[in-house]
Image (spheres, helix red, strand yellow):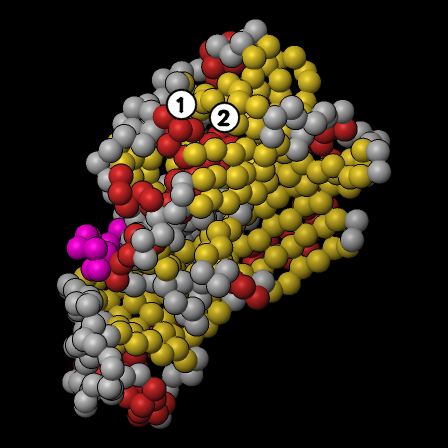
């Protein structure tokens, strides 16, 4: 089934085109992003059963962007009818920089005008099970069944929290020469198994995600064994002895490294502000020749996917690292214009009320030729890292600090059964990436989390890749 178009946006479209026509008589560039998004959450746990509208994902409104030959201004609003058009025009001319005269002390803009090349697009994503059609009670019943099955696996499981979220997205991007419309739905879910350990509770969380509907619940159920097994392992976990070790990373940990170690570092609005060291390394080796890295809303189907970004740039597949060489970054339209590059379709807003930043979408390493079994067998003294929990990086100095829930000991090419937790993964990004010596054929992408930037504006992303083997500093 296809995601249906928004009646609200279709009704507003002729009025928005009239508004653009009025403003185009005075401004060199005019565009409108119109959004109608709706999200719901469901979760079951010891604390109760909950379902409702997800505020962060439920927004309806418009943001207008104009360029007067010197600078850009934006104006967001929520009401649109024929009578509102004169008031919106007046507000733009009053609140944004007026055309007549240049305020004292203000220099001409170093930015040029965003290209407005002709383009028309209408795209709708597919899904198998409509969450609304399935109904809240059926979704909660499915989550409850997973929870009860998880708790029944072992008496040491004190809770097994389960959740599901979806968002239906409808957007128009209009300008004098562009008429773009997209309608899509993403879904994700999680299972968090919990066990007591001494005076504490240890938790192991797994997720599932897709550009689709409630069919993700079947994916989630398939991960119950992993969640329960992981939580039980943590009961006997030991503290890590700090040091540098040979490590094999699961696709989930690889994804965290991709996102935190290099994803933020190649967001080109940071290049403009000289806040990212990657700007100085374009064309140079920054990783093992085994590594090729992508980002793009068009390259995979997951929660970071869309058909055009919030600046009207069509979705891309951007090769960031090619066989170890840093080829390019990712950008929003104005960062690209400032740097003299082509925008990559990564201009994203948390909502129509927030500014556009360069943001990641689906970010990952390409798979390689090695098997997971051969990777484990090649490690004399090290760890299998799994279940990432959080991370952060310093793009200016290329440092990384990530939290991993589980490190499984490997001795002489075999897993010993000993588990260490929690783990702090640190290091200098190029050193870590250049130390990669094996890359598996296995590949996985996951988008159950979110990414924050700026004033902590949040957007959905996915990340992942194959298993990788590298030397990593653990603590």
Q: Is residue 339 magenta?
A: yes
Give the magenta range: 336-344
Q: Are marks 2 and 1 in contact (CB under 8 Å)?
A: yes
- Give the CA distance from mark 2 to mark 1: 8 Å
Q: Which mark is residue 417?
A: none
Query: Left or right of 400: which side holds 298?
Result: left
Q: Nearer the viewer, residue 232 or 399?
A: 399
Determine the residue positioned at 71% across, 58% down.
Answer: 50
| Residue identified by numbered label 2 | 472
User: Can residue 168 be seen?
Assistant: no
Query: Left or right of 257: which side holds 90?
Result: left
Query: Left or right of 203: which side holds 432?
Result: left
Determine the residue positioned at 33% across, 76% down.
Answer: 74
Determine the residue positioned at 36% across, 22% down.
Answer: 368
Q: Residues within 10 Å of mark 1 (few under 14, many from 20)?
A: some
User: Residue 441 is drawn in which quadrant?
Assistant: top left
Q: Position of residue 233 (x, y in %)?
A: 72, 26
Secondary structure, mark 1, is loop
């Amino acid at each position: 089934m296809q995601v249906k178009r928004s009646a609200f946006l279709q009704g507003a479209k002729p009025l928005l085109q009239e508004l653009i026509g009025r403003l185009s008589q005075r401004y060199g560039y005019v565009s409108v992003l119109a959004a109608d998004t709706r999200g719901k959450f469901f979760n079951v746990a010891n604390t109760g059963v909950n379902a409702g509208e997800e505020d962060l994902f439920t927004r309806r409104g418009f943001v207008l962007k104009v360029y007067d030959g010197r600078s850009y201004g934006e104006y967001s609003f929520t009401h649109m009818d024929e009578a509102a058009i004169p008031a919106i025009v007046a507000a733009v001319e009053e609140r944004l920089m007026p055309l007549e005269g240049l305020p004292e002390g203000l220099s001409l803009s170093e930015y040029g005008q965003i290209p407005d090349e002709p383009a028309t697009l209408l795209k709708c994503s597919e899904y198998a099970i409509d969450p609304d059609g399935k109904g809240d009670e059926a979704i909660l019943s499915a989550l409850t069944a997973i929870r009860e099955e998880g708790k029944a696996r072992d008496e040491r499981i004190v809770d097994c929290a389960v959740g599901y979220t979806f968002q239906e997205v409808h957007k128009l991007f209009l300008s004098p020469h562009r008429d773009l419309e997209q309608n899509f739905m993403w879904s994700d879910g999680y299972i968090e198994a919990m066990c007591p350990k001494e005076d504490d509770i240890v938790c192991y969380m797994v997720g599932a995600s897709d550009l689709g509907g409630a069919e993700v619940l079947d994916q989630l159920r398939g991960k119950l064994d992993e969640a329960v097994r992981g939580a039980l392992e943590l009961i006997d976990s030991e503290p890590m002895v700090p040091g540098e070790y040979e490590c094999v990373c699961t696709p989930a940990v690889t994804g965290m490294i991709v996102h935190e170690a290099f994803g933020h570092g190649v967001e080109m609005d940071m290049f403009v502000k000289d806040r990212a060291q990657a700007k100085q390394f374009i064309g140079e080796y920054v990783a093992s020749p085994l590594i090729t890295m992508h980002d793009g809303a068009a390259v995979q189907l997951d929660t970071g996917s869309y058909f055009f970004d919030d600046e009207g740039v069509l979705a891309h597949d951007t090769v960031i690292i090619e066989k170890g060489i840093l080829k390019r970054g990712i950008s929003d339209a104005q960062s690209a214009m400032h740097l003299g590059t082509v925008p990559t379709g990564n201009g994203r807003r948390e909502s129509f009320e927030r500014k556009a930043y360069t943001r990641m979408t689906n970010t990952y390493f390409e798979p390689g030729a090695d098997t997971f079994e051969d990777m484990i067998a090649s490690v004399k003294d090290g760890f299998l890292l799994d279940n990432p929990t959080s991370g952060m990086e310093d793009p200016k100095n290329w440092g990384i600090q990530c939290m991993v829930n589980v490190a499984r000991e490997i001795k002489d090419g075999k897993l010993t059964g000993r588990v260490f937790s929690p783990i702090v993964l640190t290091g200098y990004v190029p050193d870590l990436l250049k130390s990669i010596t094996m890359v598996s054929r296995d590949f996985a992408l996951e988008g159950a989390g979110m990414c924050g930037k700026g004033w902590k504006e949040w957007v959905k992303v996915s990340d992942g890749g194959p298993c990788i083997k590298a030397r990593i500093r653990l603590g």
